[in-house]
Image (cartoon, rainbow, N blue to C red):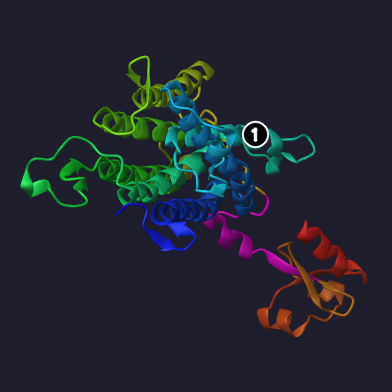
Amino acid sequence: MNSLAFISSFNWYGLLMATGIMCGIVGCYFAAKHHGLEGDVIIDMIIICLPLAIIGARIYHVVFDVIDGNSWTFAEFCGFSDGEFKGLAGLAIYGGLIGAIAGAVIFHFWKNRKKLPENKRVSFWQIADVGFTFIMLGQVIARWGNFTNGECYGEVVTNPAFQWAPLSMKVGDEWRTSIWFYESLWNFFGFFVLLYLYLGRHKSFDGFVFAAYSICYGIGRAWIEAIRVNDVLYLGGMRVSVFVSVLFIVAGVAIIATHIIRAKRAGKKVFIFVNQKKLNDEYFGYEKTKLAHPMPDIVFFKDRKKVRNKEEVIVDENGVAIKVKDDGTDNNATTGAPLSGAAKRENINTKEVISDDAEDAYEDKWDD
């Protein structure tokens, strides 16, 4: 197969890329709530980070291709050839990761602007943790696009026992090592490790999951790029992707080491892989996390029963239930306001009678 059309406007590579992106977005949306982040934060993050990731992937590929001696026009950079849009053939994953990181930095400053309340703010590390967990999932899926394009392969496979897809791939008349498959497999297991670190009962400081991604992906990619024989980018005789992989590994180790050193200096416990039930301010950095201060619309599972048991209803002057509010006392006798049928069926207490405009005011408040 070589860029076989799935439908008239899509090819397999583009379809798999889009599928990986969509799976990552959906996963981020639901997983973020486990760390006290509202789903809307993820939508805002995607709007900023995704375009920058695509632009970064394109720039990275084109820049190093120009360094390698090839020439590009601006139209070709944008995917046009002979006046027609041919697609962005040539996207480098490390450029995409760098673009996504740049987007997270921009999102951090935008989301933390002064007029927002403290509990609505989001740090770079909180975005990086959830984002890169599911970027790994997207990479698992998107790598199969290399198979459809007949690219990303290694040395010739001479043993007939291994001359079958996806362990190897047919390139011309030769069977070649399918290094895209081995990277996809590595990322598959890496994704579940990151998912456990992010969603599991044992939590770590903001930035730990991103550090784990950098180390895990860096190791796998360095190995893959070292045995790759096609479309290899060089700079001064060095394989660029191997060099960048090493930088990612070093960065991941540095993030974890920095946390440990700062925790020791502050006289606090190291906040790495700690049971969530035991978390408190004794762990360095915990007080800054959304686990300690979740966003307004987030109620952790362990707190839902507690909140539900304290509910009571505020009604308007006609006895129609308007809003649930915590009080813990029986106020039916003091208000004298009749409950609506729905409220009576639920046996919920009322607290106060409010004005004719209360329902509109309540809707406006919660719409915000």
Q: Residue at x 47, y 25 (%)?
A: 66
In the rendered image, the residue lying farthest to the left is 160
Q: Which residue is mark 1?
A: 106
Q: Position of residue 152 (x, y in %)?
A: 30, 40
Residue 109 x %, y %: 68, 33
The quadrant in which residue 235 appears is: top left
Q: Residue furthest bottom?
A: 341
Instruction: Name the quarter where the N terminus is drawn.
Output: bottom left
- Among the 4 quarters of the image, the one containing residue 216: top left
Identify whether 262 is placed above or below 350. Answer: above
SS label for mark 1: helix
| Image location of residue 174, percent across then percent down | 16, 43
Q: Which residues are magenta?
A: 296-314
Residue 352 location, quadrant:
bottom right
55 within the magenta span: no
Is residue 210 left or right of 165 when viewed as pictured?
right
- Residue 204 visible (yes or no): no
Tell whether 170 sits left or right of 252.
Answer: left
Q: Residue at x 79, y 80 (%)?
A: 339
Mark 1: few, some, or many residues within 10 Å (few <14, many ≥20)?
some
Amino acid type, residue under disc 1 in the picture? Ile
Q: Is residue 92 left or right of residue 101?
A: left
Where residue 48 appears, as percent x and y from the top left, is 63, 42
Q: Nearer the viewer, residue 366 or 139?
A: 139
Question: Within the magenta stretch, is there residue 298?
Answer: yes
